[in-house]
Amino acid sequence: MREVVLDTETTGLDPATGDRIVEIGGVELHNHMPTGRVYHQYINPERDMPEGAFAVHGLSSQFLSDKPVFKAIADAFLEFVGDAKLVIHNASFDMKFLNAELKWIGNQPLPYAQAVDTLEIARRKFPGAQNSLDALCRRFGVDNSAREKHGALLDSEILAEVYLELIGGRQPDFALNVVGGTDMNRGRTVSADAALPQRPAALPSRLTEAEQQAHSEFVRSLVNDALWLRNK
């Protein structure tokens, strides 16, 4: 199963009043484990940067002035996303902005059903608790010390760790360390259905005959009619 953990930074809170996306970050997961593939793009919003937004993410109009506009990066972004589930913290916010940007360039919107909202998951799991990304990092012991300001790619990487904890830990589907057909411990390609290698011959017992006899007598002293002794 392919998922993309996604985050955006914007010039404000509402595209209906002219706010735009200025950064998109995404982290690819396969069977809930990071594959190493990421998407990251700064975007020229073609407008000024309000002081309040700059205080949040630190992206100035000057810094963004030579970055591509959304229309120029839309195809590459949509190709990266594909039909993967989009794991987003407060999905309604990011989906609202993404679909506004797509609408403005004449593209079809992303279906909201494609989104997995980690904020809603956290609220169901911890009702009444603080469920911001920083609060969840503290709860799960996820290191967010590099998060001095919001950043789309950094926040996506942090959210990927939080998401795995929210759905039951770092190996929720018992996939161990196999990601995309690769054993992450040994760096070799494996099949999910591959059988474990078998020894050509069983190892000889390390117990001496006297030790085996002593063990049998000890068991009989505990239980006279044990089922596993009836055929012996």
Image (tube, rainbow, N blue to C red):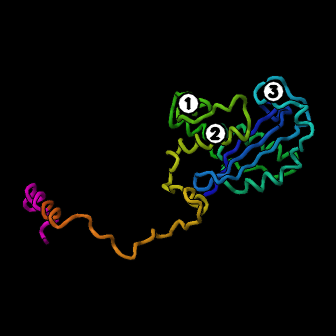
Instruction: Decide which of 148, 174 is in the foreground and name it.
Output: 148
**Does the magenta segment cover residue 18?**
no
Label 2 SS: helix
Label 3 SS: helix
Determine the CA span between mark 1 and mark 3.
25 Å
Give whichever of discs 1 and 3 has the lower sequence position: 3
**Image quadrant for the N terminus?**
bottom right
Instruction: Decide which of 188, 12 is in the foreground and name it.
Output: 188
What residue is at 64 percent from the left and 39 percent from the top? Answer: 158
Residue 3 sits above or below residue 213 on the image: above
Q: What residue is disc 2 on? A: 158
Residue 225 appears in which quarter of the rendering? bottom left
User: Residue 29, position in %: x, y?
Assistant: 63, 52
Q: Which mark is residue 54?
A: 3
> In the picture provided, is 134 more to the left or to the right than 139?
right
Q: Which residues are magenta?
A: 216-232
User: Residue 50, position in %: x, y?
Assistant: 85, 25
Q: What residue is disc 1 on? A: 138
Three-letter code for the amino acid on which mark 3 is drawn: Phe
> In the picture provided, is 196 more to the left or to the right than 121?
left
Q: Residues within 10 Å of mark 1 (few under 14, many from 20)?
A: few
Residue 135 appears in the picture as rendered = yes
Residue 68 appears in which quarter of the rendering? top right
User: Residue 164, position in %: x, y?
Assistant: 56, 45
Residue closest to the far bottom = 200
Label 1 SS: helix
